[in-house]
Image (tube, rainbow, N blue to C red):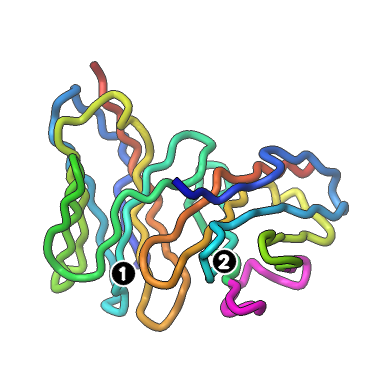
Amino acid sequence: QKEVEQDPGPLSVPEGAIVSLNCTYSNSAFQYFMWYRQYSRKGPELLMYTYSSGNKEDGRFTAQVDKSSKYISLFIRDSQPSDSATYLCAMVRDNTDKLIFGTGTRLQVFP
Amino acid sequence: EPEVTQTPSHQVTQMGQEVILRCVPISNHLYFYWYRQILGQKVEFLVSFYNNEISEKSEIFDDQFSVERPDGSNFTLKIRSTKLEDSAMYFCASKLVLGGYTFGSGTRLTVV
């Protein structure tokens, strides 16, 4: 079983839709969770950082963590064509400094 | 907004040659990292660096790799004798203490 699982997509939605992106993980030692956006041949751009179960909102983005289910989500409201990118979940265990990434979900938002 | 700067953006090198990838992390950050991403694959951890020494490294980071912070601003990754399979995007990242990791735009390394 992979440490971090993420559906690669592609996920194709119309402009204005609510997008739900998800990751599951197998190791309960993961304590810090991040979502990154990556455009083609560019570096990952940090969108959200969370460390506790529950929701965290920032503009059109909401990150959700459920540690009991080992499941994290990113919701994008009012999606725009400029949101078309690959979204990476990443997480860190408590006693290490190493980010473990999911494979990324490719999102396409069409006008 | 502060950013992590990487140079060059693209480097082509012959197999067996040495390459140095350069990074300028965010100025007040304390933790520095190198990651790589082979085309079509996920981002993989290589090494973390804190207080002028390696704090953690992956199995990928073998004797062919080294890192250095030669002055107060630069952070470099050296590959001594490049192999074809070293072709990838290499990302530098930095972090203050807690919080998310800020990544640079990457250096695309092509080994021919």
Image coordinates for residue A39, horizontal then vertical, percent: 44, 35
Residue at 18% over, 63% down: A65
Q: Residue furthest top?
A: A111
Q: Quadrant of residue A18?
A: top left
Give the number of the disc on residue B75.
none
Q: Quadrant for the N terminus of chain A, please.
A: bottom left
Q: Secondary structure at mark 2?
A: strand
Residue type at numbered disc 2: Phe
Count numbered badges in the picture: 2
A62 lies above or below B9: below
A104 lies above or below A67: above
Residue type at numbered disc 1: Tyr
Q: Which residues are magenta?
A: B49-68
Residue under pointer 2: B32
Image coordinates for residue B73, horizontal then vertical, percent: 66, 60
Residue under pointer 1: A32
